[in-house]
Image (tube, grey):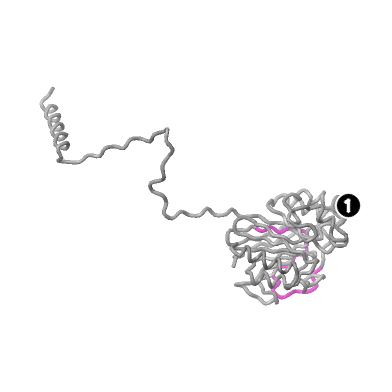
Amino acid sequence: MRVGAARRVAILLALLLCMQCGGGSTTTPSPGPDPTQPPGPNPNPNPNPQPIPSAPQVFAGAGDIAQCGALDPAHATARLMELVGGTVFALGDNAYFSGTADEYRNCYDPTWGRFKSFTRPVPGNHEYETPGAGPYFSYFGANAGPSGLGYYSFELGENWHAVALNSNIDSRDGSAQGAWLKADLDAFRNKKCTIAYWHHPLFSSGQNGPSAGTRDFWRILFNAGAEIVLNGHDHLYERFAPQDPDGLSNPSRGIRQFTVGTGGASLYEFVSRANNSEVRIKQFGVLKLTLNADSYDWQFTPVAGPGDSGHGICH
């Protein structure tokens, strides 16, 4: 061995002896994990974990859909719906002209019937051309809520509460439906955002005009902080700015109404321009709502021509 190498070995031995007698410190390596034991708790958990955001929900559809004897428009809007996905709303007058079992079987089913299992409908006045709208309730089953009532609610993701209402029966504040609506909204007041829909619109520039009998629906929803109301009945597309139940503009707390009676029945003309009406389109088409954690996006896609899109914030 060379002298230099022997000296280095001697120095290392001296250092080790010194550390063992207290002149320094060493760290004993910890043993590796025992593969036969379950893992213990994380020694350094994240003190501020971030919540996993709720996935956006798609809610799409139209009303006034399958007109027997003239089904081409309903077939065209059904093809649009196939591209949208999500949960489907049908805003009433779904099978013309009387909502009979034959009309649902022969006209609605070959068009929008392909979405039946994930459609949450409401009845229109044409469904009630047949006593009690019986074929409507039979066709949609549990998806239409309790048979004979036509109003119910459900959840769209973690943040949105949806309320389906029946504007063909008593909708006053003191009615059974009005009392149910108040109780339902109170029970789900923890939800960030609320959407409601029924057939007859309170506000309209179309030939059927406003349906004042639904104002109590609006008042109850407005007081609960709802964001959106969807309607059919007038065979056209119309979007309103946020407003209160008396039709006064209210950008901070108002409800935005969409009339989407464009599913396939013969289109109507606009006969006026209602206050707060922002967009009016006479064309068959479907409305897609993308419901985010605390906001929403809308897109009206027509069979032909220009559409409509935008963004809103929950209250």
The residue sitting at the top extreme is 1
Q: Is residue 198 left or right of residue 51?
A: right
Quarter of the image with the N terminus is top left
Position of residue 204 measured from the top left corner of the image (x, y, whole percent): 76, 71
Q: Amino acid at mark 1?
A: Asp
Q: Is residue 304 visible?
A: no
Q: Residue at x 74, y 57 (%)?
A: 145
- 170 in relation to 154, above or below: below
Residue carrying label 1: 102
Position of residue 302 measured from the top left corner of the image (x, y, whole percent): 74, 58
Q: Is residue 114 left or right of residue 186?
A: right
Q: Residue at x 75, y 74 (%)?
A: 273
Q: Residue at x 76, y 56 (%)?
A: 144
- 175 in relation to 29, above or below: below
Whether residue 287 appears in magenta in the rendering, the answer is yes
The part of the image, by quadrant, that contains residue 174 is bottom right
Residue interval drawn in magenta:
269-289
Q: Is residue 135 visible?
A: yes
**Number of dots carrying numbers:** 1
Callout 1 environment at 10 Å: few (<14), some (14 to 19), or many (20+)? some
Whether residue 104 appears in magenta in the rendering, the answer is no
Identify the element where label 1 is drawn: helix
Q: Residue at x 81, y 62 (%)?
A: 124
Position of residue 269 measured from the top left corner of the image (x, y, whole percent): 81, 68
Q: Is residue 183 left or right of residue 70?
A: left
Quarter of the image with the C terminus is bottom right
- In-front residue for pair 162/7: 162
Q: Is residue 169 left or right of residue 60?
A: right
- In-front residue for pair 138/249: 138
- In-front residue for pair 122/150: 150
Position of residue 20 measured from the top left corner of the image (x, y, whole percent): 17, 36
